[in-house]
Amino acid sequence: MLARVWSAAIQGIDAIKVGVEVDVSNGMPGISLVGLPDTAVQESRDRVKTALKNSGANYPTKRIVINLAPADLRKEGPVFDLPIGIGILAASGQIPTELLDDYLFLGELSLDGSLRPVAGVLPIAAAAKRLGIMGLVLPADNAQEAAVVQGLRVYGLEDLRQVMSFLQNPDRFVPTAPEIKKADRAAHLSDLRDVKGQAHGRRALEIAAAGGHNLVFVGPPGSGKTMLARRLPGILPDLSFSEALEVTQIHSVAGLLKNRGMLIADRPFRAPHHSASGPALVGGGSFPRPGEISLAHRGVMFLDELTEFKRDVLEFLRQPLEDGFVTISRTRQSVTFPAQFTLIASTNPCPCGYYGDSIQACTCSPRQREQYWAKLSGPLMDRIDLQVAVNRLRPEEITGNAQGEETAAVRQRVQAARQISLTRFADRQTDSFACAQGERPVMCNAQMQSADLQRWCQLDEASRLLLEKAIERLGLSARASDRIIKVARTIADLAGEGNLRSSHIAEAVQYRTIDRMQ
């Protein structure tokens, strides 16, 4: 007898419907599993066999053939344990088959028949809603995560016995009630008022948050570069519902959700070590998984000690910084991950750390400084809008009790500036991951394209002459000059001004520290 149960496989951060076809026929007892299964799927044969026996079901002593369709799509993980078990029961006539076409089944089976949670449930639920599936049957621990997607009947069950009972009498079970809510904004976020001095760095941090601009701090050890960088998440605006859904979906695929059934409220903050490899940053593996830049989607990626990263690793960032997504190609598949993040980095000005310091003399030779900065290519630095010098604090700043402006006040200004840009680009905002299909959504000033600059960033004569002098003196590329204009647009938004002025351009040029150092 032939039976078919529907499940799903994750490809990138999307889900693809998979048919689990099971045929039980007379012949030499045994089980054959086909359809490009990985090792974890192959091992499901033993898990399912033992789980069926320990759940009071009969395991047929016949020839069993299981096909995971489409056959050219690689299948991985224990998510197919439950649909394979249900397929065997249906094909051997032990359960009714009326509901099998209406639901997706997924879950890992323990040897005693209990259901264990799996990763990637949220994108599977979103795909089920898109495909018109009535509902999902899955482990109880995954139920709230799936219920985030409204319009689905989600049944979170404890073990295989309950699944069998549900298929025989579904009216006895109540779907999981959706509790769509975002976790409270983290109370542990550090406050900007704890930062002493560094008015220039604080101002740059505010501009970066308001416009989504990439930022690098350059300064001697102990000047507060890392302290400033780690306070950026606190002044960023809250995630919108659609953004929170995107971020939660990515973390679901990566298996990093801590609170199942809750949308992630805080913008991600990722800080990989400088020993990280290229695939760790952008994603990869034989079955591609999101890397750090995708886990930082809609949030911040902090690269501390930027010049300690390998040059070839940093070059991996060039295309995602420009496009907002990364495509990973493998022999059998090509996967696109979203990667719209704000890059913030810190570095010393030289190997010893004291080049240009007012107190401690630099011990590095010109050749050593040249080799030190050679790790940062021109094209990469062009993509960093704000390059800010962070100088040593004065003694009175270190010992004084004066506190800076608190995070809440700065965040209000950032939100007001962001709202101005959202209104400006209302006709350029698209749905989730549209950039991967060739569209270029614009959510903040840093994402503006050439046409947007011409429309929203008209320069008067004084501003144009000032920018031309900066390009000539600093040897700026066309991309770098465009980024100066984008930063100036954000400075104007923070001031509540519609037109760009020469003062906005002048301030934006001041945030090209590294260009002036060369």
Image (tube, rainbow, N blue to C red):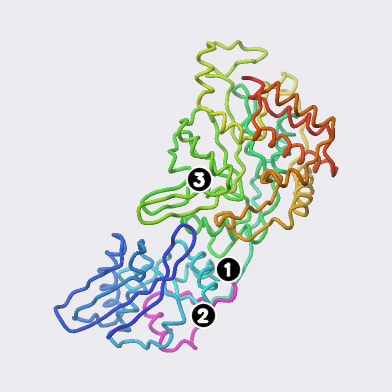
Residue 75 point in image, percent of width and height? 35, 63
**Residue 458 vertical placement versus 47 (above, below):** above
Residue 26 point in image, percent of width and height? 17, 84
The residue mark sitting in front, 1 or 3, is 3
Disc 2: which residue: 134
Where residue 483 sits, quadrant-wise, is top right
Disc 1: which residue: 148
Sequence-first tag of 2 and 1: 2
* Foreground of the two, 383 or 258: 383
Q: Does 172 lie within the magenta span?
A: yes
Q: Which mark is residue 353?
A: none
Disc 3: which residue: 292
Q: Give the residue at x 51% y 69%.
A: 127
Residue 356 point in image, percent of width and height? 64, 15
Report the span colored magenta.
148-173
* SS label for mark 3: helix
Q: Give the residue at x 33% y 84%.
A: 90
Residue 253 point in image, percent of width and height? 47, 58
* Foreground of the two, 160 or 188: 160
Q: Does 234 lie within the magenta span?
A: no
